[in-house]
Amino acid sequence: MTLWIMGGSVWNEASGRLENKHIRVEGATIAEIVDGSAAPDTGSAEVIDATGKLVSAGFIDMHVHLRDPGFEYKEDIETGTKSAAKGGFTTIACMPNTRPVTDTPETVQYVLNKAKEAGVVKVLPYAAITKNELGRELTDFAALKAAGAIGFTDDGVGVQNAQMMKDAMALAKSLDMPVIAHCEDDSLVKGLFVSEGEFARKNGLKGIPNESEAIHVGRDVLLAEATGVHYHVCHVSTEQSVRLIRLAKSIGVNVTAEVCPHHLVLSDEDIPGMDANWKMNPPLRTPRDVQAVIEGLEDGTIDMIVTDHAPHSAEEKAKGMQLAPFGIVGFETAFPLLYTKFVLTGKWTLGFLLRRMTADPAKVFRLAEGRLEEGAPADITIIDLDSERTVVPETFASKSKNTPFGGWKLQGWPVATVVNGKVVWSE
Ligand SMILES: NC(=O)N[C@@H](CC(=O)O)C(=O)O
Ligand SMILES: [Zn+2]
Ligand SMILES: [Zn+2]
């Protein structure tokens, strides 16, 4: 099967400019990229006219929640991957806080099988560090790796016990697997749901302190140094965490990190009121923290952007700020949000944003994807950089609509997504 993507604009890292290209895909591989002034004979091949559109390697999201098995009323592997494709993502790594928790080879296999049958993008499953994510007993790392898990994490909760984390890291290291950490010290956040800051003060609330995250980061980079494991920090949100990761990297600790669009764009001072669509974990922090995570991403302390797509039902979110679960959906707003807020404003080059959503996560997690090059997997995203649209959550492909960005006017919307050489979503 031949597919030609004709006349699109491709970012050239060397020149720092967009260049007109035709791309020939054979099967699941990018076979050839030729100059846009050429007139290749496309014969009977399938042709996509990408004139005037950005053509990029498909986005990679190393932190998502597909809720399958067990919470299919929030999302399932079919709807979650469709939502990903609509957002321009072609590879996603899903978290194990499902029901049952993805802590056995059988559940890893279930996720992989369902993704093969019903999924439209590539799905890489993480497995839990501890059984049922309870922090009491390690899972069978070797068996989980053999079943296809790509790393270990108890995302949703922090691993509270330092010895447990050290044992997990030593075992992961012996298997050449990464440990991915949700950093949160429970003793500092009991029952709290917004961060320490203006919003909490104005509303007479006790806030979640920044140290609740950074204490785990500090502990874990020391344990990563001791064990030599690849340690990856989830959803970095505080100035203190950025500082600790920067220091650890500077002395050669094998640590990497991610940040979410909402922590780059929103602070606690933007929260309009007691609306649970603004409740997520980590919480929106102060403007100073927002500045620190932006700088961390810019200087490479933070390696990649992830969405932490965390769907919850309307009923759950209607319980209000205090009782609703933490989390917001992210696939379908991530690129337009960051393109509008950082590229159109001249703060970042388009190339920088694309790199942090493609080549950089691929490099950290040793994936073949994330490159728009001859010989690379044909995972491709086509984006209309010019159209401005309003975010309408009701139109999301995700089952859940929990976003704080409803009504925002954004530019840079994906129009077609190709995975393994097949168009899996288009307008
Ligand atoms: N980020 C969130 O607010 N929620 C996530 C859990 C997590 O990522 O820690 C979820 O599973 O809902
Ligand atoms: Zn988390
Ligand atoms: Zn998460």
Image (cartoon, rainbow, N blue to C red):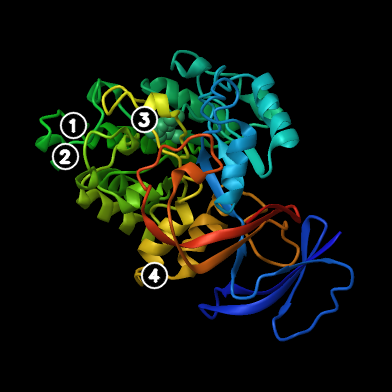
Q: Position of residue 200 (x, y in %)?
A: 15, 35
Left or right side of 291 for 70: right
Reading the chain from its start, which is encountered first: label 4 or label 1? Answer: 1
CB of mark 4 near ligand 1 (< 8 Å): no
- Gap in Å between the C-alphas at discs 4 and 2? 29 Å
Can you tell which of label 4 and label 1 is closer to the viewer?
Answer: 4
Residue where numbered disc 1 is placed: 207
- Gap in Å between the C-alphas at discs 4 and 1? 34 Å
- Gap in Å between the C-alphas at discs 3 and 1? 15 Å
- Gap in Å between the C-alphas at discs 3 and 4? 30 Å
The quarter in which the N terminus is drawn is: bottom right
CB of mark 2 near ligand 1 (< 8 Å): no
Residue where numbered disc 4 is placed: 344
Residue where numbered disc 3 is placed: 326
Q: Position of residue 107 (x, y in %)?
A: 65, 21
Q: Position of residue 327 (x, y in %)?
A: 39, 34
Q: Position of residue 77 (x, y in %)?
A: 63, 33
Residue where numbered disc 2 is placed: 199
Q: Nearer the viewer, residue 259 or 43?
A: 43
CB of mark 1 near ligand 1 (< 8 Å): no
Quadrant of the rendered image containing residue 253: top left
CB of mark 3 near ligand 1 (< 8 Å): yes
Mark 2 surroundings within 10 Å by alpha-carbon count, few (fewer than 14), some (14 through 19), many (20 or more): many
For label 3, the SS is loop
Residue name at image x 55 percent, y 31 percent: 75
> Looking at the picture, which amino acid does disc 1 mark?
Gly
Reading the chain from its start, which is encountered first: label 3 or label 1? Answer: 1
The reply to whether callout 2 and callout 1 are in contact (CB within 8 Å) is: yes
Reading the chain from its start, which is encountered first: label 4 or label 2? Answer: 2
